[in-house]
Amino acid sequence: MKHTLFERIRVNRPVVDCFNYLRDFSTIPQWDPGVFSAEKLTPGPVRARAAEHSGTEYQLVFHIPKRKLQMRYEQLEAEPNKRLVLSGYSLPLCGNGESSKPGALSAYDEICFDALSPELTEISYRAELTLHGIPDTLLPAFKPALNRLGKKVAKGISDALSPKAHPDATPSLFATLKDRLIVPALPNFGRRGYQQMPDKSLSQRMDGKRVVLTGPTAGLGLSAACELARLGATLILIGRNRERMAQCRQHILDSSGADANTVFCYEADLSSLSESRRAADAILAEHSHIDVLINNAGALFSEREETPEGHERALAVNLLSPTLLCRKLASAMNEHSRVINVVSGGMYLVGLREHDMEYRQSPYDGSRAYAHAKRALFTYGQELNADGVTPVYAVHPGWAATPGVAKSLPTFNRRLAAMLRDSRMGADTIVWLASCASLPPSNALWFDRRAHTANVLPGTAASARQRQRLLNYLDNALQAYL
């Protein structure tokens, strides 16, 4: 059985933006509601099939209830700003012990672009679908559903490329009530929250923007780095292992197709303030300006450890080094730059720790130490916003299945495995905050692209006295490294 879908849309966007976004088919989960995930299998820039090589290949996973439908696609043509052509076929269908032969479904997709004006583009989408083994006499039964699918895809492309409204930086009353009740909000911390987002697109280009990112070698950091590179950003990465940094850099280049001269690596163990300072000084010496600083690196330790500089290790990684980077790199940033601090839902449960920040007298609890450090980092960001120079945003990535979570919280990772987000979902709001063109200053906690309250439980909001004590502590701890 064969059926052709055809839709035509117009978007207020330059044709080059439209083509650059859609040419990498791995963006399809952002605009096709039927696709769960997509992976670019061929390393390097997107390329069309030629006599000497095959085209870029992708593997897609579709939303099928109680099943897992996978398809393999190949890029046949990629004429800049004019035309994209891909062909695909299904792989074995898995789930509930069922399977089908490869090739039960095949597709031929064509996307054409027409620049009607410098800011208006017409996009034509055509998909030829073949369901092998199903007689043409059944087409009338399938046709309405297939046509609805085509319209949803076209609407997804239109929404992804259309200019976005100014995001609301104030938590809504409904979201705040839901957060304060805690239980109703918990399911959205997993993948369901991401899947229910009305907009998943990341189409705002970042060409010429320089982004400093810590913790890029795995998990959220690696996913964010790949997406930022795809958007055209120049990446300045800080990590503690030279070999893993080299592997990370190559993975980013393979995934995004970015130029090698747009990814820079700096080695530093963020538990060491001396190494963090050295990395910041090297960055300042080689980069005249910074548009975005993403403090993503984080660590949770089961037992208290003290660094050679005399600081509790989790505090050094999660608070002191991010604060030091903010202060050291401030000279290369301005009111058009932004800082993004990745925090944690664990901070919902705690307020600022006023005494014994280093856990020298108190019994050590790794999860609480981590939460206290993230609460302090969030509060420090609020203080920077009060200064009114470079805006600071805090983001909660949700519950994501990352190597760090698997190592630090094995029981949590195992019991909630079925509902955890993948790293791409967890990194989404980080990338969105970095790339969003119009973003108002905000002291909210951003989660799934929406502003939320950070003070869920009574007593967790920081008082003026507590904030001043935190600033005094940070001044004393960092004075020798500034």
Image (spheres, rainbow, N blue to C red):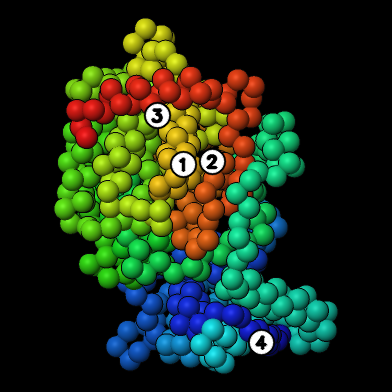
Mark toward the start of the polypeptide (2 vs 3): 3
Where 170 sits versus 133, above or below?
above
Mark 4 vs mark 1: give the one in front.
1
Q: CA distance from mark 2 to mark 4?
A: 41 Å
Amino acid tagged 3:
Leu
Mark toward the start of the polypeptide (1 vs 2): 1
Are discs 3 and 4 less than 8 Å apart at CB?
no
Where 481 sits versus 281, above or below?
above
Disc on res. 443: 2
Where 346 sits versus 244, above or below?
above
Please give the residue where the numbered disc 3 appears in the rendered image: 300
Please give the name of the residue rendered at 24% of the width and 50% of the height, measured from the top-left corner.
Answer: 245
Circle 3 packing at 10 Å, graded few (<14), some (14-19), many (20+), is many
From the top left corner, tell me how far across and down residue 464 is, in percent: 51, 23
Please give the residue where the numbered disc 4 appears in the rendered image: 8
From the top left corner, tell me how far across and down residue 405 is, in percent: 45, 36
